[in-house]
Image: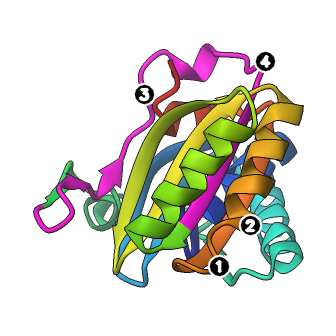
Amino acid sequence: MAFVETGGWSPAMVVLDAMEKTAGVCVLQAELNDQPGVCLKLTGNLADLEAAVQAAEQVGRTMGVPVLAHVIAAAAEGSRAAFEAASEINPLIEQAVVEFPREGAMNEQASFAVGLIETQGFTAVFEAIDTAVKTANVEVLAREKLGGGYITVVIKGDVAAVRAAVEAGSAKVASLGRLVAAHVIPSPSQAVLSLLPIK
């Protein structure tokens, strides 16, 4: 088992994309915590998990985002009850706390890019997304709330359109709130697709 914690939904998706593209790992679940942040839980053989964790730490350094990553070589059977979380809804943000990979998504091949704009503040993210959609031909897929006013909006389209939309949307945030992260994932990995509401 490998556990990778990072602050924010969008950095977590970028890290997950890098881990799966580096090694043969499988995402078990993503659990939101109160930092706000995300704990990714992965399975695979030991060498792949170690390679994936190294990739996660490198991506975190590149993005300037703290990443706490750890591999448990042979998890005790009795410990699984602690780290495999059951489905849970946070009543304050009315959203799932534990995200499970969507059935069937693990066989999808992405021919598009995904963009993520994460802010602290609703007004800021709404303005960012309005600007993004007006800038380029992109589709809004969903929004993810982490608590503490942190919210991520996910868009999809071709790489050039998503890049233009994310850049334009991010530029609008400064006067209305705090930009936490803005990322583009070209051809997202199957693990990322399995956690996002891709149509």
Q: Which residue is mark 3?
A: 102
Sequence order check: which comes first, mark 4 or mark 2?
A: 4
Q: Residues within 10 Å of mark 3 (few under 14, many from 20)?
A: some
Sequence order check: which comes first, mark 3 or mark 2?
A: 3
Q: Which mark is residue 174?
A: 1
Question: Quick one: quadrant of the N terminus?
Answer: bottom right
- As measured in the structure, the alpha-carbon distance from the residue carrying label 1 to the one carrying label 2 is 7 Å
Tell me what residue is drawn at x 68 percent, y 56 percent.
169
Residue 197, x across and y down, in percent = 46, 31
Q: Which residue is mark 2?
A: 171
Residue 5, x across and y down, in percent = 56, 73
Residue 176, x across and y down, in percent = 52, 77
Do labels 1 and 3 touch, CB within 8 Å?
Answer: no
Q: Which residue is mark 4?
A: 111
Which residues make up the magenta segment? 91-118
Do labels 1 and 2 touch, CB within 8 Å?
Answer: yes
- As measured in the structure, the alpha-carbon distance from the residue carrying label 1 to the one carrying label 4 is 32 Å
The total of numbered circles placed on residues is 4
Tell me what residue is drawn at x 65 percent, y 31 percent.
156
Sequence order check: which comes first, mark 1 or mark 4?
A: 4
Do labels 4 and 2 touch, CB within 8 Å?
Answer: no
Tell me what residue is drawn at x 74 percent, y 66 percent.
171
In the rendered structure, does residue 116 fall within the stretch colored magenta?
Answer: yes
Q: Quadrant of residue 34?
A: bottom left
Helix or strand or loop: what does disc 3 sit on?
A: loop
* Front position in the image: 5 or 186: 186
Sequence order check: which comes first, mark 1 or mark 3?
A: 3
Marks 3, 2: nearer the viewer = 2
Q: Is residue 5 visible?
A: yes
- As measured in the structure, the alpha-carbon distance from the residue carrying label 3 to the one carrying label 2 is 32 Å
Going by the numbered disc 3, the residue's amino acid type is: Arg
* Front position in the image: 185 or 176: 176
